[in-house]
Image (spheres, rainbow, N blue to C red):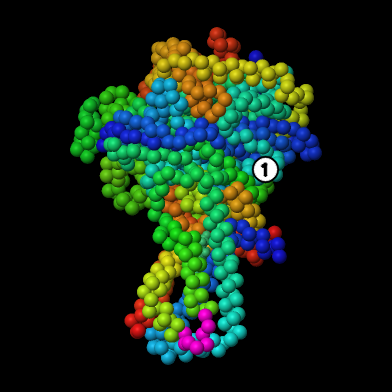
Amino acid sequence: MNRLTNPLGTSVGKKLMMAVTGLGFCCFLTIHLAGNLTIYGGKDFFNSYVEHLHSLGPLVTLAELGLLVFAAIHIMTGALLFYQSLKARPIRYSVNKRAGGRTLGSATMPYTGFILLLFVIFHLINFHFVDKTNITTFQLLSNAFANPVYIFIYTVAVIIAAIHVSHGLWSAFQTLGANHPKYTPFLRGLSIVFSVVVGIGFGFIPVYVFLLL
Amino acid sequence: MTKSINITLKVWRQKGPHVKSGFETYPATDISTDMSFLEMIDVVNEQLTLDGKDPIAFDHDCREGICGMCGAVINGRSHGPEKGTTLCQFHMRHFSNGDTIVIEPWRAKAFPIIKDLVVDRSAFDQIILAGGYISVNTGGAPDANSIPIAQEIAELAMDAAACIGCGACVAACPNASAMLFTSAKISQLALLPQGRLEAANRALAMVRKMDELCFGNCSNERECEAECPKEISISNIARLNREFIKAGLVSSVK
Amino acid sequence: MQLDAKIPSGPLAEKWDKHRFELKLVNPANKRKYTIIVVGTGLAGGSAAASLGELGYYVKNFCIQDSPRRAHSIAAQGGINAAKNYQNDGDSIWRLFYDTIKGGDFRAREANVYRLAQVSNNIIDHCVAQGIPFAREYGGLLANRSFGGAQVSRTFYARGQTGQQLLLGAYSSLMRQVAAGQVSMFPRREMLDIVVINGQARGIVVRNLITGEIENHAADAVVLCTGGYANVFYLSTNAMASNVSATFRAYKKGAFFANPCYTQIHPTCIPVHGTYQSKLTLMSESLRNDGRVWVPKTPGDRRPPNQIPESERDYYLEEKYPSFGNLVPRDVASRNAKTQCDMGKGVEETGFAVYLDFADAIKRDGKDVIQQKYGNLFQMYEKITASNPYETPMMIYPASHYVMGGLWVDYNLMSNLDGLFVMGEANFSDHGANRLGASALMQGLADGYFVIPYTIGGYLAGTDRPEITTDHPAFKEATRYVTERTRKLLSINGKRTVDDIHRQLGHILWEYCGMSRNDDGLLKARKLIQELREEFWKNAMVPGSSEDFNQSLERAGRVADFLEFAELLVIDAFERKESCGGHFNEAYQTEEHEARRDDENFCHVSAWEFKGDDNDPELHKEPLVFENVELTQRSYK
Ligand SMILES: Cc1cc2nc3c(=O)[nH]c(=O)nc-3n(C[C@H](O)[C@H](O)[C@H](O)COP(=O)(O)OP(=O)(O)OC[C@H]3O[C@@H](n4cnc5c(N)ncnc54)[C@H](O)[C@@H]3O)c2cc1C
Ligand code: HEM
Ligand code: SF4
Ligand code: FES
């Protein structure tokens, strides 16, 4: 086990775990988004998708457990990395200026990440840990998004998520060693496209549901 | 065209490693725009000396951008705002009359301040010491042409080898990470057939040493690449990551 | 005292082999009992410390900079010579030997230079094995370029950063020995004295540049690799910390200083702008392959270059030297530039520059070709001067660049003091009166990797040395001397900064003991130097204390030594009544204004012995014997 934990305990090892779990989240986001897009097919279409999903039973539980483990790793490692990096510069500069490397996404990773964590908890309380015996998921959604405050929270959270992955996706590839003069520009573009798709795809759901009301 | 400007310097003054410190303001008058930044400090120091004050301590040696000795953060930019330039090669013509220039030392836990703008970069030597070499003794090498190396590979290795060890990457990194410096050496040696034999050991040992020295963690901000006076590319960091994955997860090296 | 160069007998090509066989060996198990001090981490010092560590000696290695990787050698651009003959163009060990001897104007030892040519090939092999990314051909083999007038292509290079790459190679080997515990590094230390016990060099006294503490280090032998003294001219292409202090301290302790007047002025440097200027930047000599040197015909013509018509331009090198043109050797090109500027034909605001014009080359070959050849140099020039050499001609002027003189050493690279070895630019050995391009790097690495490992063993195995520690009175005495000198420097409390005085010293030497010299000027210079030295000790201003990081104090100590050494340089120049290589005495020139040697009376090494602060030094002559080459007069018409 030492053979594995030793390398993973280093800074590069921790980054690798961030990258793998982060990419895992990106996959989850993609699937989650694909599923949620069924909402544009109407209420019944959406509800049948949810039923389908739930009928997978243990598979879903397994995926949920996986995500939980990934989340634990991603969050704890991210927090540790952030803390260590803060400590690496005990006295900060009085003038800070960018040289052109940093982006909005890269500069805010720990903060957007932290907000995402709060949001995920909020989101799960809203839609996951609720008694769904007498109510369809769609109704749950419409109830929530009837409230403009909810719409606001969700829209902001989605934008934050988009910012997080706008750096995260490309960064994960770089961390995994995938940097090549031919493909890197493409990957950087892909990160942006992905974040825009996530932003718009998820972002319009609450609005759409609100408008359907 | 040469002209003279008057500027104000706000310089970090610190007598020793753990003593009280802060910014001091000095006028720099009649500065020729043809001067290098360090020559401007020379002029200010001459005046300070004549006024009976302690001149500003700063490291420098070659003054041609190759020894890696000089460096300070100028208005928030490592080695000043000009791309691909060390502080000694950065000229006063980039400033205008009346400007205020804030000068700070490299700031990182791994680079403690010795005095004023002088920092201790011996951590970089420690990283090289951990494995930044090929283990050959003098005398036993085969004929130089017995190891052909493709030109592109030699050029890539040279790109990485151009690092001057100045520390600007650490200074510019929001996390004070030493990944660009470390990756430049790991890359150079990993690219060359001579260096492959020890590649796994080297990658693991150098990364561990880097961590031990309290550098921060790379988060791919790319500020290092943007500030590096030798324009070392972060593709070297990706190569380090690959070497590390191979070494840590695949090779039999501990 | 008779100087014995200890040149082995026998045919030239067999001397080194024979000598290595005859040298005593140190039992491998005993090596770790010996401590060797190496001062300097440049190509000479870095390579020596690494290879001595590999052999099993315990090495203490010192340098001024914060890391051994930053020694002045890092700045060398052009390349390193070796007689590999990879280009199949007729090179050989003999040819490299001959070129170097002739380039040095027949003022170097045959045996040393031949050995240098012999080991040059091993250097390249070792450097490649270390992972130095030399330039390569498409087929993967090593590339070469030609350099410094040689007619074969034998220069190996790593872009314009050959010195950097070679030094980082030596540094990596050094770090490996540090990791192995064979070498202890002492960076940010300045050697201030050498300790001699029973006629043997047994240690050094250094100042810790961070804490100001004076430290004593004892050893079985001391190896000085402290580089050259070109900074005596104040402005030079050398790094700011380059100094004469280490070698000069050794001179004062009895080591002979050889040929101090052999200094090299490089013709293509970026000219001086103003008094604030702190150093000069070298532009590679290769530029003269395509650039044409000219000045306006009329003195005082200050029109911008593009407004001066062809008919009013003086391409003085092409006119004077029709066959070599702009490619005459360094000393000839430099002297001619000075002559033109002295006539008032110089350009730039200061009048101390000549044009190096690429317009014709760009017209002939196209901008792309020129860019490919010199792109990085043009870029560097533009960075410094903010003028674009593709459009307006470059302005260049000669600058002090390298010194051939240094401490006298024998064939083993040991000075006349037992146990004191001197290598690299710090010794006088291989370049005679003039060094060819790309051969200083070769010499530094030859000395460190392939000569000292053998010869130091011979010394250690062949001599008796008493057990000593740093408690020995000689260390106490040296420490007292150093402390007292520091105290004195800090208590002058005058009105002139050290840099100001150094600048003036530079002017004196440049004026009277630079590219061309004459007896009157030299006498005058000597007097001016004495006066300036006196003023220094009365009127210099050295702020701060001795107990912390004090760069003013560091500089003051170096300048104090330069002020003494400069006089020795002038004395030596005065004494050598001939012109050879970098030493040009106007009274000794051919009708074509070329250097005229006097082989009858001056075919010797001048080695100076210190005789006390108030006495003139004493001259010792080591005759140079040429058995294998014929002495000829250089001509570049
Ligand atoms: C701009 C430039 C370009 C050049 N290009 C070429 C080229 O292309 N090819 C070529 O062959 N040559 C070239 N040369 C010449 C060559 O670089 C030098 O001659 C050579 O590098 C000298 O090496 P060294 O090891 O003797 O000394 P250095 O590299 O000068 O090292 C001196 C060492 O001694 C230490 N030291 C000095 N004084 C003290 C002291 N008092 N106490 C403690 N430590 C001390 C220093 O810290 C340093 O580590 C060039 C020189 C210059 C200036
Ligand atoms: C849907 C949710 C999330 C996705 C898709 C996601 C995705 C990613 C990705 C791809 C990375 C890049 C990894 C790398 O640079 O190699 C990353 C980094 C990061 N994430 Fe997340 N993440 C999510 C949630 C979170 C949460 C909840 C937190 C926090 C508490 C968080 C904190 C971080 C931090 C701090 C980093 C930067 C680590 C570093 O570069 O050093 N993320 N994330
Ligand atoms: S990578 Fe660039 S910035 Fe970092 S030490 Fe090397 S040269 Fe300096
Ligand atoms: S002083 Fe050498 S790089 Fe600036």
Principal secondary structure, stretch drawn in magenta = loop
Residue found at x 38% / y 79%? A146
Up the image or down, C231 lies above or below A160; here it is above
Which chain hosts label 1? C
Residue range (magenta) = A130-137
Residue C231 in magenta stretch: no
User: Which residue is denoted by mark 1 in the rendering?
Assistant: C177
Secondary structure at badge 1 equals helix
Q: Amino acid at mark 1?
A: Gln
Quadrant for residue C615, please give it.
Answer: top right
Up the image or down, A11 lies above or below A142; here it is above
Which image quarter is the N terminus of chain C in?
A: top right
Residue A132 in magenta stretch: yes
Q: State the image coordinates of residue C586 (x, y, percent, origin top left).
A: 39, 19
Frontmost residue, A124 versus C443 = A124
Total marks shown come to 1
Frontmost residue, A47 versus C67 = A47
Q: State the image coordinates of residue A78 (x, y, percent, origin top left).
A: 54, 61
Up the image or down, C532 lies above or below C548; here it is above
Which image quarter is the C terminus of chain C in?
A: top left
Image-based side of C607 in relation to C537, left or right: right
Asked if residue C183 shows in the view, the reply is: yes
Residue found at x 38% / y 76%? A147
Q: State the image coordinates of residue B109 (x, y, percent, origin top left).
A: 55, 45
Image-based side of C34 in relation to C605, left or right: right
Asked if residue C289 shows in the view, the reply is: no
Frontmost residue, A208 versus B140 = A208
Label 1 beta carbon less than 8 Å to ligand 1: no
Q: State the image coordinates of residue C68 (x, y, percent, origin top left).
A: 58, 38
